[in-house]
Image (spheres, grey):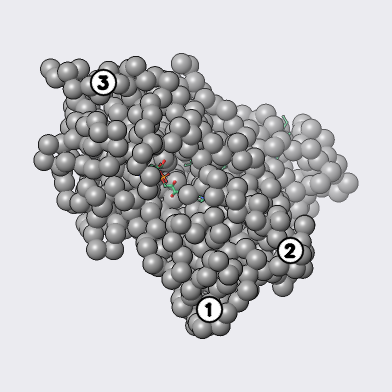
């Protein structure tokens, strides 16, 4: 078993930058990852031979799949939306989703608090990777791409938003997102917990979430501005 | 322009009182006048009144009692949107504390800082916002002027013109020819003509499939061209022909009485002709002495302030600002920057750096929506584009449907932002 796994645990030279091309880069320890999987995921997801959908969809061949693409599983509307936007489960996005499911998909039905330890996530992903038959299709396989993007530093999450500035900045948003919270076609963003709001905005800014409108909106917002917006839209929800 | 219409809204007593000269004397509240209650002016008036909580006296001058959006007027043509759902009244803007005066502005005395209304009234201002949208350049399509708009509608200012165009298309003879004379740059809503062609094709494909569409265009290329052409080929194969400038598209004349279009000397008999002439800033901008030789009002990129007058801001289609397309979204975005600056100058509230953005959606066929957009910032001379995006050809149907649904979300969002 160990030997079998190890065959897959190295990232193909194809997509690795030239200077690294000679050595393959291990993602993590798949054997340790099996244990992480059992503790964290197995209660909802099956993986391996004859895996079936349970509370969550089975996770065979998850790498490079479109998000929400099993026709015979009932996903949340939020995950389906990300799938239509073009979200694919490459290494970086899987890592982000496991770390904090709501950062990548705010309205996801996966009620899982997330796994903050990057080393355990790396082991877990190495393990899941063994059940994907197209390991070479991992676009962002270079080790540098395995950042902890959504794992925002405590300082960023602690920034106190300037509500008055947030109100000004919000005027850009309310052309699409209604202040009343009414929504159809474009999700509502009023009254969210600040942290959910902040991680969602950073996920667009880092292009983890694929939607181009929101990527371009988020791209020019800095940490203070995102905090200001989060504070303002929360306050608006309380009015 | 008809200048004989004069009327006041339901909140008339308030508005009239504020306008009569004695009431203004001794008034300490700073006064802002906004000319034009469309996407730009409506937003500016509302935001200044809302955010200043009564500290600024805001008067909005707009002749119509109901604003019919140009956005989604093409969808009405295509049968995807109700005519009534295009119309929005000024009740909620008035309720935020804006004096809404239904009249035409006919002149601006920049020394005295007053706006003259068709009624003869003069409204004083400390800051003036000019947002009259567009007017057409006379003689830009030989043979056509506004008096011919019932024979050959432009349908480029929404309202009854669009109803007329729809009626003409619906009653067109079987196998007839629809001709669109497209405008030269710059004009309002760059993807507007392409979207209109799509919606007319959609209509005809159902009711009159042997009919043809001919687009006569003076431009080499146009907005979302690859997306439209792919869509027309897929949904309406063989129906649409475009004549660009290389085949005489810039040399066109119309004969409304004969229903003829003369393209580079060749006479075409047409059944419905939609003439979208060359455009310039709404006439009042010119009367106020705010326009350049090309007919647009140049503004500073940081705050949309007229380069001709420190106390005047020009918004939306009428302005010459740089890279932003003339769209409702842009006008709304610019208005928020202006509202923040004016309020800051008059009340001392915080002024934040300008941020501009735009996204324009278009519908090509049922559930086949596309978008184009960008963010902008002030450059040294002009507004410049920072990042941009556009839908790709070959996208799958689920994504296109979602994009269409987002456009409906946007429509509801922007009209709620302005009129809701
Ligand atoms: C077919 C079509 C489709 C479009 N689709 C879209 C779209 O999908 N998205 C988008 O963002 N944009 C779209 N647009 C563009 C959009 O409609 C305009 O860019 C936008 O309305 C510009 O706003 P504005 O405030 O400058 O002018 P307007 O909205 O035209 O408002 C000007 C107002 O000023 C008033 N006015 C004029 N002169 C005077 C005067 N002398 N005194 C007092 N009042 C005066 C007019 O009555 C009018 O209400 C479309 C346009 C067309 C034609």
The extreme right residue here reads: A50
The answer to whether B150 appears left or right of B42 in the picture is: right
Q: Which mark is residue B18?
A: 3
Q: Secondary structure at mark 3?
A: helix
Badge 1: how crowded within 10 Å, few (<14), some, or many (20+)?
some
Q: CA distance from mark 2 to mark 3?
A: 54 Å
Say which of marks 2 and 1 sits in front. 2
Is residue A87 visible in the rendered image? The answer is no
Most foreground residue, A179 or B10: B10
Residue A208 is situated, as x and y percent measured from the top left of the image, at: 54, 48
Rendered view: B404 above or below B148: above
Q: CA distance from mark 2 to mark 1?
A: 22 Å
Say which of marks 2 and 3 sits in front. 2
The extreme front residue here reads: B257
The answer to whether B211 appears left or right of A174 in the picture is: right
Residue B69 is situated, as x and y percent measured from the top left of the image, at: 51, 42
**Earlier sequence position, callout 3 versus callout 1:** 3
Most foreground residue, B52 or B100: B100
Most foreground residue, A49 or B378: B378
Q: CA distance from mark 3 to mark 1?
A: 54 Å
The answer to whether A95 appears left or right of B135 in the picture is: right
Residue on which disc 2 sits: B173
Badge 2: how crowded within 10 Å, few (<14), some, or many (20+)?
few
Rendered view: B128 above or below B275: above
């Amino acid at each position: 078993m160990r030997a079998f796994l190890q065959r897959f645990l190295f990232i193909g030279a194809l997509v690795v930058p030239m200077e690294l091309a000679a050595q393959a880069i291990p993602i993590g320890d798949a054997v340790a990852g099996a244990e992480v999987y059992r503790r964290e995921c197995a209660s909802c997801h099956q993986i391996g031979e004859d895996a079936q959908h349970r509370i969550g969809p089975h996770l065979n061949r998850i790498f490079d799949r479109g998000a929400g693409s099993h026709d015979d599983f009932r996903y949340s509307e939020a995950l389906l939306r990300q799938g239509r936007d073009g979200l694919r489960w490459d290494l970086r996005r899987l890592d982000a989703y496991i770390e904090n499911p709501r950062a990548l998909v705010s309205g996801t039905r996966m009620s899982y608090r997330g796994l903050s330890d990057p080393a355990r996530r790396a082991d877990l992903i190495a393990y899941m990777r063994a059940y994907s038959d197209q390991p070479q299709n991992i676009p962002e396989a270079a080790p540098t791409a395995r950042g902890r993007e959504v794992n925002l530093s405590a300082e960023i999450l602690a920034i106190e938003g300037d509500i008055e500035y947030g109100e000004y900045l919000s005027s850009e948003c309310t052309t699409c997102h209604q202040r009343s919270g009414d929504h159809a076609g474009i999700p509502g963003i009023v009254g969210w917990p600040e942290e959910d709001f902040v991680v969602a905005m950073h996920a667009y800014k880092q292009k983890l979430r694929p939607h181009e409108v929101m990527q371009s909106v988020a791209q020019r917002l800095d940490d203070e501005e995102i905090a200001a917006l989060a504070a303002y839209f929360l306050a608006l929800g309380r009015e | 322009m008809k200048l004989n219409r004069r009327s006041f809204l339901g909140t008339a007593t308030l508005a009239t009182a504020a306008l009569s000269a004695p009431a203004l004397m001794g008034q300490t509240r700073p006064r802002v006048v906004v000319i034009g209650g469309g996407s730009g002016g409506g937003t500016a008036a509302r935001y200044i009144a809302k955010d200043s909580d009564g500290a600024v006296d805001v008067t909005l001058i707009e002749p119509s009692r109901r604003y019919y959006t140009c956005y989604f007027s093409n969808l009405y043509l295509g049968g995807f949107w109700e005519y009534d759902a295009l119309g929005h009244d000024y009740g909620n803007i008035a309720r935020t504390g804006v004096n809404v005066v239904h009249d035409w502005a006919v002149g601006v005395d920049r020394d005295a800082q007053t706006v003259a209304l068709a009624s003869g009234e003069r409204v004083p201002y400390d800051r003036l916002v000019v947002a009259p949208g567009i007017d057409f350049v006379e003689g830009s399509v030989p043979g056509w002027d506004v008096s011919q708009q019932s024979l050959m509608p432009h349908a480029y200012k929404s309202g009854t013109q669009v109803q007329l165009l729809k009626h003409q298309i619906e009653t067109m003879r079987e196998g007839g020819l629809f001709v669109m004379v497209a405008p030269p740059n710059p004009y309002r809503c760059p993807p507007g003509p392409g979207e209109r062609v799509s919606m007319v094709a959609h209509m005809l494909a159902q009711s009159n499939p042997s009919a043809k569409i001919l687009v006569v265009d003076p431009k080499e290329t146009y907005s979302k061209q690859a997306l439209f052409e792919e869509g027309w080929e897929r949904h309406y194969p063989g129906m649409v022909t475009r004549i660009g400038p290389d085949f005489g598209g810039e040399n066109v004349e119309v004969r409304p009485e004969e229903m003829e279009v003369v393209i580079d000397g060749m006479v075409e008999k047409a059944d419905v002709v939609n003439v979208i002439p060359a455009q310039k800033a709404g006439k009042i901008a010119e009367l106020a002495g705010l326009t350049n030789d090309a007919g647009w009002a140049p503004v500073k990129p940081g705050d949309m302030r007229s380069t001709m007058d420190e106390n005047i801001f020009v918004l939306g289609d009428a302005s010459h600002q740089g890279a932003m397309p003339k769209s409702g979204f842009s006008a709304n975005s610019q208005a928020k920057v202006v509202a923040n600056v004016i309020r800051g100058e008059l009340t001392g509230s915080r002024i934040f750096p300008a941020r501009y953005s735009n996204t324009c959606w278009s519908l090509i066929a049922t559930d086949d929506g596309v978008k184009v957009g960008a963010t902008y910032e002030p450059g040294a001379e002009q507004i410049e584009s920072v990042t941009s995006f556009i839908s790709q050809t070959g996208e799958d149907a689920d994504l296109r449907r979602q994009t269409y649904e987002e456009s409906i979300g946007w429509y509801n969002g922007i009209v709620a932002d302005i009129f809701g």
